[in-house]
Amino acid sequence: MKFKISLKLVLCLGLLFCSLAGPLESCQAQISRDLRNIFQSMLDDLDDDLRLKFEEALETDSSVIKLTREQFRRFRQSPVNPFDGLKSAAVNQSGTIIALKFELPDIRNRPVHPLERQNSGLLASLRPAVKNAAKSSVVVYSDNRSVALGTIFREDGYILTKASELDDTDTIRCKLFNSIEKRASLIEINEEHDLAILKINAKGLLPAKWANQSASIGNFLLTPDPFGNVLALGTFSVPTRSTAVGQQAFLGVQPETTADGVRVSAIQPGTASALAGLQNGDIITKLNQIVVNDASTLVKAIRDRAPGDKIEITFSRNGRLQTTTATLAAREYSGEQAARFKMMNRLGAVPSQRYDNFPSVFQHDAPLFPEECGGPVTNLDGEVVGINIARLGRAASYAIPASTIQSLISKYELAPELRQLKVQARQ
């Protein structure tokens, strides 16, 4: 799903005309937090002068970007431009300044069909499963607004949350399951995992109950809030891995759909397919015992994996079925390819301020909003299998697995004297 011009991307064309928004001077609007995240996500991949324009909009809190005709042309053709409508927008030949007023479609208030997985009736029926985990969750406020959820990991008031959403660390508050609010002190930030440790003045809290086993592909996952609601239902889709911008799992075949399966019409030397012994003309029929009927199914199956994953490939060669194991490599994208891949991943969702470069995360498809990250994610037994850390794209959210969280907590608690000094310094 892309943000199209018909979905409230308004063109304000200098002094020539101002479609739907009046004269150029009136084309001013405060930028929403969701749109701010979209702008920030584009900065690293824009040309220098275009980046300055979007940085200025962020600094002045404006959703209007004023561009020269040349800048407009480059932004319209940029691989990180998510607004498809710009490519067909008609611009008069006279005039020198083009102002673009950006408005996102109302993703947050989109009506949910009764047959969708996220319908309110189904989510309400799952409330009993998250009864205890909800009490281990808090709402985190910064600068007087909700910015994240948090996960209680000690009964004496220690909480983990998403660090990059804490705009003002002097105004952090946490709301508990009983709606009591507590002022919170920022104790420590782990930048690698984008986690912050908070401390509130409380006793007898319910720490998260960590699952003994990690979730598996296809398991249903629940995201609770502190008040016992299920915010989203997701499915575990990609195993724990390290993420890196511009990387994608790569098999190295040119697939071709046939009546018998997916024919390998070309092999790239040195890739996972070549090292696994595949040859031109082989017919791939299964990946990890999953039937592969066409090229698109094969491509999606590979893209759902991560670099370093091992996959079993069943194939036919000269009428004889064989199996081999391939270790998927990473295909490095750079320049325009990397920018386009990142932007395509983020379309149709409100991404977190930081949504990648995590050393250990698993992926699920719960449609979270940025302020719904930082809290626990559970299995259907109510055990906490991880902490949601980022919304990446339309069908992708990341969570840090419970085993990684427990390891981080253990290292932190090895130095209780240092921890106590940090608490005292912030109180």
Image (cartoon, rainbow, N blue to C red):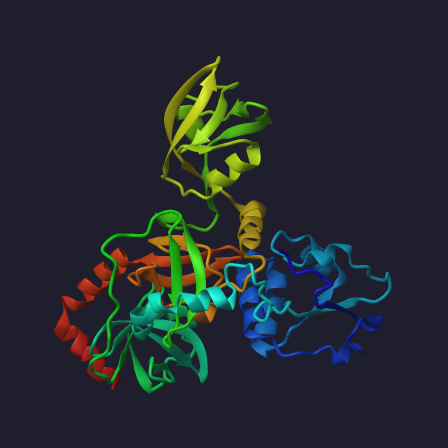
Q: Position of residue 368 (x, y in %)?
A: 47, 64
Q: Position of residue 386 (x, y in %)?
A: 32, 60
> Along the horizontal axis of the image, is 108 left or right of 306?
right
Note whether residue 193 is visible: no
Q: Position of residue 31 (x, y in %)?
A: 60, 75
**Which image quarter: residue 371?**
bottom left
Which image quarter is the N terminus in? bottom right
Note whether residue 60 is visible: yes
The answer to whether 336 is drawn above or below residue 274 in the figure is: below
**Which image quarter: residue 35?**
bottom right
The residue positioned 47% from the left and 39% from the top of the image is 301
> Along the horizontal axis of the image, is 18 left or right of 354?
right
The residue positioned 56% from the left and 54% from the top of the image is 343
State the residue in front, 177 or 245: 177
Q: Position of residue 93 (x, y in %)?
A: 86, 61
State the residue in front, 335 or 367: 367
Most extreme residue toward the top is 318
The residue positioned 16% from the left and 74% from the top of the image is 418
Which image quarter is the C terminus in? bottom left
The answer to whether 264 is drawn above or below residue 232 in the figure is: above
- Report the number of numbered marks: 0
State the residue in front, 112 or 344: 112
> Along the horizontal axis of the image, is 5 left or right of 411?
right
